[in-house]
Amino acid sequence: MARVVLDTNVLASALGRGGIPGAVFKLAIIKQITAVTSLFLLAELSEVLAKKFDFASDKINLIEKKLKKKFILVNPRRVVEVLPDNNPDNRVLEAALEGNCDYIVTGDKQLLQLVSWEGIRILTGRDFYEQYLGRNS
């Protein structure tokens, strides 16, 4: 089973809008992929859901609780500075590395430009979903 970090932008889109990010998120919830996250990424998600999607704090707490139950929570031991200026997306790379992930699913252009890193493929939600369906049909 694929081990995947779903970047904050993918999770926020999944929870706020659905679409392809929602379909990828569903794969994680129904355990067709193994989703990995970290406390940093969960905190970032909570902030985005509150500020950009106006989610109430009780709803955010419920989402965080569910993600902690359904996702593998890692505590990265290695600090990564692949992207310049202490870019917070370095935390995505750290979580993927610590979680021994096969994929990072993101909409972030800087991460996508890497294509892969340390053997971890970096894909958009659409590309991941299409590849996943192709492998499992």
Image (spheres, rainbow, N blue to C red):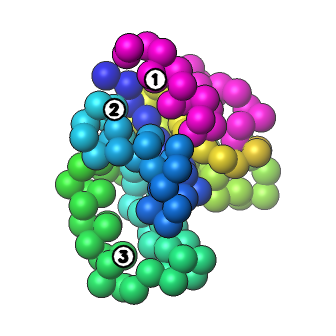
> 136 and 71: which one is in front?
136
> 91 and 54: which one is in front?
54
Question: Which amino acid type is shown beneath numbered disc 3?
Answer: Ile
Label 2 sits on residue: 33
Distance CA(mark 1)–CA(mark 3): 28 Å
Say what secondary structure mark 2 lies in: loop
Distance CA(mark 3)–CA(mark 2): 23 Å
**Quadrant position of residue 59:** bottom left
Answer above or below: position of 34 versus 7.
above
Label 1 sits on residue: 132
Dot 1 or dot 2, earlier in sequence: 2
Q: Pointer 3 and pointer 2: residues touching (CB < 8 Å)?
A: no
Residue 80 picture location, percent across and down: 61, 44
Residue 25 picture location, percent across and down: 40, 46
Residue at 54 percent across and 30 percent down: it is 128
Outermost residue to the left: 69
Question: Is residue 34 shown left or right of residue 112?
Answer: left
Question: Is residue 94 shown left or right of residue 23?
Answer: right
Question: Which amino acid type is shown beneath numbered disc 2?
Answer: Ile
Mark 3 nearby-residue class (10 Å; few <14, some 14–19, many ≥20): some
Please give the range of residues in magenta.
111-137
Residue 11 visible within the image:
no
Residue 21 picture location, percent across and down: 51, 47
Q: Nearer the viewer, mark 1 or mark 2?
A: 1
The question of residue 124 being in magenta is answered with yes
Q: Which of the labelled discs sits on residue 60, or is there none?
A: 3
Mark 2 nearby-residue class (10 Å; few <14, some 14–19, many ≥20): some
Question: Which amino acid type is shown beneath numbered disc 1?
Answer: Tyr
Question: Is residue 48 shown left or right of residue 71?
Answer: right
